[in-house]
């Protein structure tokens, strides 16, 4: 029993780390420019397809593909910012919400059109489906290597982003822009560029997550929807605009999903995540680490 | 040969959503001066500062800095030219520490060494900030926050420092302190544009002053001249 429980917790933490990276990008975009990027999951889907096609067509393993997909997604983020997001930054909140929602629908349908609705999966990757055996509290547990890699990579990307925001001059300028755009401009900060940077970094995050997911997860046009919903819940739990809040929120959701499915009814494990979402919104609307505003 | 002014504002008109807030304002600042812009609440003082720093745009007239036109430029370009604006309400980054706020003030500067030098100068001027380097700005008292805002405004080593109501909301002893600091900053060679509702304090300090009424500059003179003018006495000093 305890062996199985530990297995479930491990599973929850691994998934949680991946949810966290998706959530971190969402939180960064919201925190800096006040835009809820509802197309976030669909960018994740694009990242997955990018890694998939690199592997299928060019024989580039996702582990190396990471170095191509991540900057490509960053550049895609720049393009989307320049062509769409910059126009809605000053628009009413609802307009911005509808625009990113519409962008998501467009991307999903584009994927349907280009690649059909089929479920795809990569075989023959460098990591393959290796499993390592670990011994915890006397019991034997199994950890999937591709999943461990995805979780580790997600945590590393989150840590890197956190370091960038907290410890570099540009990161400080991003924070200043998030807190008070006009005041930041008076400091000589090009706030429009900071917005562009935040959006592109957010999209690059799902590029990393998407690529690492292709090592073990199915790829299809609608794959992003569940991820963006979970990321929204993670960001709500952690507090909008907070990076470490999104990280902790992601881990909490991974655990709720995994442990909840184990203890309760597996079919309702996702419902449980959203039940927690409702509870957080009612009891602590600004989340665990959110800014008071 | 007449000296070219550091800043020249010529007959500007500024509108908020089509409604004019400034009808016709003109003034000049020579390098090294303290120039005060005084007037009652709603006269348009803040609007003028925001227009100079590029947060608002004038619909008529022009603004020249060091002889070249700057109106229409973006705020971060204007800041990089050497105009530092300490805005109304201070505009501090509350969740960041004192030293982070100060470093953001020096955002346009490249040399780490020079920034550290300025940091030391600023700490000398405001010793309280040196004790509080890692405290979050929002947790400080109003007076300390005002000190931080002015200190941050000095971090770019500006050619022109614009202070919007630095005395607002401060207790009288603190106001005196702020005015003293402004005097020191000026003596060290920074040109200052001071916007104040505390008319007497501002005029006592100023080399040159302008009175703004309903969006128009209606009177100019040295600080002393304006202190003795009938209009100022009646309208602002209550004598």
Image (tube, rainbow, N blue to C red):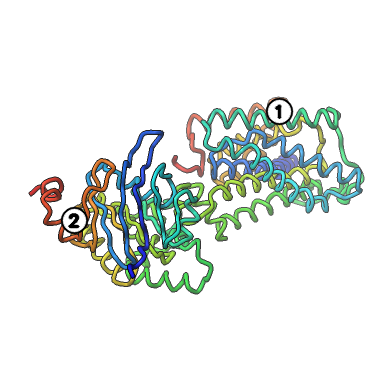
Label total for image: 2
Which image quarter: residue B175?
bottom left
CB under 8 Å between discs 1 and 2? no
- Which residue does the numbered mark 1 point to in the structure image? A105
Furthest toward the front, the residue is B1
Q: Secondary structure at mark 1?
A: helix
Q: Are marks 1 and 2 on the same chain?
A: no
Q: Secondary structure at mark 2?
A: helix
Label 1 and label 2: CA atoms lie apart by 60 Å
The C terminus of chain A appears in which quarter of the rendering? top left
**Location of residue B32 in the rendering, given as x and y in whole percent from the top left corner:** 32, 68
Does any portion of residue A9 appear in the rendered image? no
Say if B114 sits above or below A277 in the image. below
- Which residue does the numbered mark 2 point to in the structure image? B172
In-image side of A146 versus A188 (left or right): right
In terms of depth relative to the viewer, which is nearer, A88 or A237?
A88
In terms of depth relative to the viewer, which is nearer, A85 or B142?
A85
Does any portion of residue A214 appear in the rendered image? yes
**Location of residue B232 in the rendering, given as x and y in whole percent from the top left corner:** 15, 50
In-image side of B87 versus A256 (left or right): left
């Amino acid at each position: 029993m305890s062996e199985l429980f530990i297995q479930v917790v491990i599973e929850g933490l691994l998934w949680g780390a991946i949810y966290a990276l998706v959530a971190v990008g969402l939180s960064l975009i919201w925190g800096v420019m006040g835009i809820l990027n509802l197309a976030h999951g669909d960018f994740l889907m694009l990242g997955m397809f990018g890694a998939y096609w690199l592997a299928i067509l060019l024989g580039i393993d996702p582990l190396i593909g990471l170095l191509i997909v991540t900057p490509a997604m960053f550049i895609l983020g720049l393009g989307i910012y320049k062509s769409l997001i910059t126009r809605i930054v000053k628009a009413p909140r609802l307009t911005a919400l509808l625009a990113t929602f519409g962008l998501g629908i467009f991307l999903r349908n584009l994927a349907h059109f280009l690649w059909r609705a089929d479920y795809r999966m990569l075989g023959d990757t460098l990591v393959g489906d290796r499993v390592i055996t670990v011994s915890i509290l006397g019991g034997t547990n199994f950890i999937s290597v591709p999943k461990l890699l995805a979780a580790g990579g997600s945590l590393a990307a989150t840590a890197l982003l956190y370091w960038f925001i907290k410890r570099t001059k540009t990161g400080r300028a991003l924070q200043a822009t998030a807190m008070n755009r006009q005041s930041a401009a008076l400091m000589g900060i090009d706030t429009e560029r900071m917005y562009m940077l935040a959006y592109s970094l957010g999209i690059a995050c799902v590029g990393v997550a998407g690529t690492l997911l292709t090592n073990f997860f199915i790829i299809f046009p609608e794959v992003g929807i569940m991820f963006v919903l979970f990321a929204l819940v993670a960001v709500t739990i952690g507090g909008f605009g907070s990076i470490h809040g999104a990280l902790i929120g992601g881990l909490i959701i991974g655990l709720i999903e995994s442990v909840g499915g184990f203890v309760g009814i597996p079919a309702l494990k996702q419902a449980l995540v959203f039940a927690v979402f409702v509870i957080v919104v009612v009891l602590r609307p600004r989340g665990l680490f959110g800014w008071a505003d | 040969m007449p000296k070219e002014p550091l800043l020249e504002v010529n007959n500007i008109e500024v509108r908020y959503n089509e409604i004019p807030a400034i009808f016709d304002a003109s003034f000049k600042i020579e390098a090294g001066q303290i120039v005060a812009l005084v007037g009652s609440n709603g006269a348009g003082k803040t609007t003028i500062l925001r227009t100079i720093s590029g947060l608002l745009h004038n619909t008529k007239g022009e603004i020249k800095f060091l002889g070249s036109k700057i109106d229409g430029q973006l705020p971060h370009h204007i800041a990089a030219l050497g105009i530092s604006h300490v805005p109304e309400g201070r505009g501090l980054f509350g969740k960041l520490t004192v030293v982070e706020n100060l470093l953001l003030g020096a955002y346009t500067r490249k040399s780490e060494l020079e920034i550290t030098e300025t940091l030391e100068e600023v700490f000398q001027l405001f010793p309280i900030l040196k004790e509080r380097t890692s405290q979050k700005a929002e947790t400080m008292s109003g007076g300390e926050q005002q000190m931080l805002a002015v200190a941050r405004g000095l971090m770019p080593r500006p050619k022109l420092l614009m202070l919007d109501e630095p005395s607002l909301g401060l207790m009288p002893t603190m106001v005196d302190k702020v005015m003293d600091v402004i005097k020191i900053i000026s003596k060290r060679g920074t040109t200052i544009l001071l916007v104040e509702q505390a008319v007497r304090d501002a005029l006592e300090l100023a080399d040159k002053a302008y009175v703004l009424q309903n969006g128009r500059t209606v009177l100019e003179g040295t600080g002393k001249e304006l202190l003795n003018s009938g209009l100022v006495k009646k309208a602002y000093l209550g004598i």
